[in-house]
Image (cartoon, helix red, strand yellow):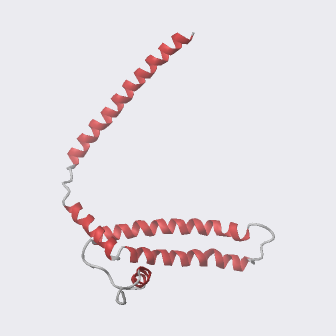
Amino acid sequence: MAGTQQPAATFVGSLLSFSLYKRQQGRVARQVTFAAVAIAIAIGVWRLAQLLPLWLGGDATSSLSSDELGIMRFLVPGILLAVGIWVSFRMVNTPSIADFLIAVETEMTKVSWPTRDEVIRSSIVIIFLIFTLAGILAVYDLFWWFVLRALQG
């Protein structure tokens, strides 16, 4: 037990590390995952930057000056954005998540993608079926509406 590390120590150590796990494998999946997480964090921080002045100085009895409020409005979201982007970058480079993303990218290369003509033909069939089923349901609905209306009156 003396040689094993605690999970929290390993996690903090991995967050502070600058190394990339299996650098050349799963690059596209990692980059797309990082971009999606970073965009989600940026949208959350942007919304926080909009709401923070209302939370901190929304009433006349606020103890913060306008300069302090301006600093807080950009400092807190800026720090959160930097930390969020760093955590998302480290997240896609942790061994368990990186191995999963590498496996995803490997499986995506095995997929047999349809041609443009196949996609167009399949889409036309599906759209036709949706409208046909909608028409059938409309006829059933009208039929039962007339039947129930006749029974009611």
Nearer the observer, 1 or 137? 1
* The residue positioned farthest toward the bottom in the image shown: 2
Residue at 74%, 77% (x, y): give it: 64
Q: Say above or below: 145 vs 12.
A: above
Residue 71: where, in percent of width, then height?
65, 79
Q: State the residue at coordinates (25%, 41%).
A: 122
Q: Is residue 32 above or below residue 82?
A: above
Which residue is outermost to the right? 61
130 vs 95: above or below = above
- The correct choice, above or below, for 136 with respect to 110 in the image is above
Q: Nearer the viewer, residue 24 or 100?
A: 100
Which part of the image, by quadrant, shows the C terminus?
top right
Quarter of the figure with the N terminus: bottom left
Position of 44 with respect to 92 (left or right) is right
Report the front residue among 59 and 70: 59
- Outermost residue on the front side: it is 1
